[in-house]
Image: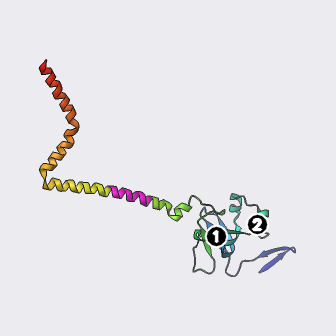
Amino acid sequence: MVKVYKGSNIVMGPPPEGWGILVFSDAYKCQVGLSKMEKKDGKEVISFYLKPHEALIKKFKIDVKGDLDRQGYCWKSYPIEMVRLLNAFDPSRRVYFCLLNYEGKDTENTDWFLGKEQCDEIGRLKTKIRGLMAHNEELKNENFIMKHNEKKHIKDQMEGVMNPLLPFIKGMLDEGAKKEET
């Protein structure tokens, strides 16, 4: 449906399937008029004909007269791997989610959505698990020795206690020997 106001102002009504929505990882959103797949600089991108929400216009200081056309739309492209269609089986209203912000830059949420923080945490936990498994093997070996060779276990334990004390004991014995000589 096309409405004409005072001669030149043409306002397009929504298409029969309704407007789509593009939500960014920083929670700002735009109305999507059109979308198309393209190749730019050898990379696949998805280009959107967007009408930014008022809050987004304020946040990114978009020049309404210079950056947007008369209906308030502009074309923006994002790497295809950074955009997800959230409701693929709903033809009435397409909802897209972009892992970047309006300007196409990473946000503090981008790494989380891509799983980088989780991968770092998994790596840290794997290292901790390997350390605990090695310690567990040491304890198993010590337990085996203790059960099957009590004398060796007692000797090992005594060496652990006595080795730090040996210099002290030797010093005391040497002092005692010097006192006896005098």
Q: Quadrant of the C terminus?
A: top left
The x and y percentages for residue 1 are 76, 81
Type of amino acid at the residue the image marks with label 1: Leu
Residue sitting at x 12%, y 20%: 181
Question: Looking at this rendering, what residue extends furthest in the right direction?
Answer: 7
**As displayed, is residue 146 above or below residue 158?**
below
Type of amino acid at the residue the image marks with label 2: Leu
Q: What's the mark number on residue 22?
A: 1
The x and y percentages for residue 130 are 34, 58
The x and y percentages for residue 85 are 59, 74
In the visual, does 163 lie left or right of 116?
Answer: left
**As displayed, is residue 113 above or below residue 176?**
below
Q: Are marks 1 and 2 in contact (CB under 8 Å)?
A: no
Magenta span contains residue 155: no
Q: Which mark sits nearer the N-terminus, 1 or 2?
A: 1
In the visual, does 6 lie left or right of 12?
Answer: right
- Range shown magenta: 121-131
Question: Looking at this rendering, what residue extends furthest in the top direction?
Answer: 182
The x and y percentages for residue 3 are 80, 78
Find numbered disc 2 in the image and state the secondary structure of the residue it sits on: loop
Residue sitting at x 18%, y 28%: 172
Please tell me which residue lies in front, 179 or 116. Answer: 179
**Pointer 1 local density, CA inside 10 Å: few below 14, some 14–19, many at least 20:** many
Location of mark 2 (residue): 68
In the visual, does 72 lie left or right of 182?
Answer: right
Please tell me which residue lies in front, 15 or 161. Answer: 161
**Residue 93 image-quadrant placement:** bottom right
- Magenta stretch prevailing secondary structure: helix
Q: CA distance from mark 1 to mark 2?
A: 17 Å
**Residue 133 image-quadrant placement:** bottom left
Residue sitting at x 19%, y 55%: 143
**Pointer 2 local density, CA inside 10 Å: few below 14, some 14–19, many at least 20:** some
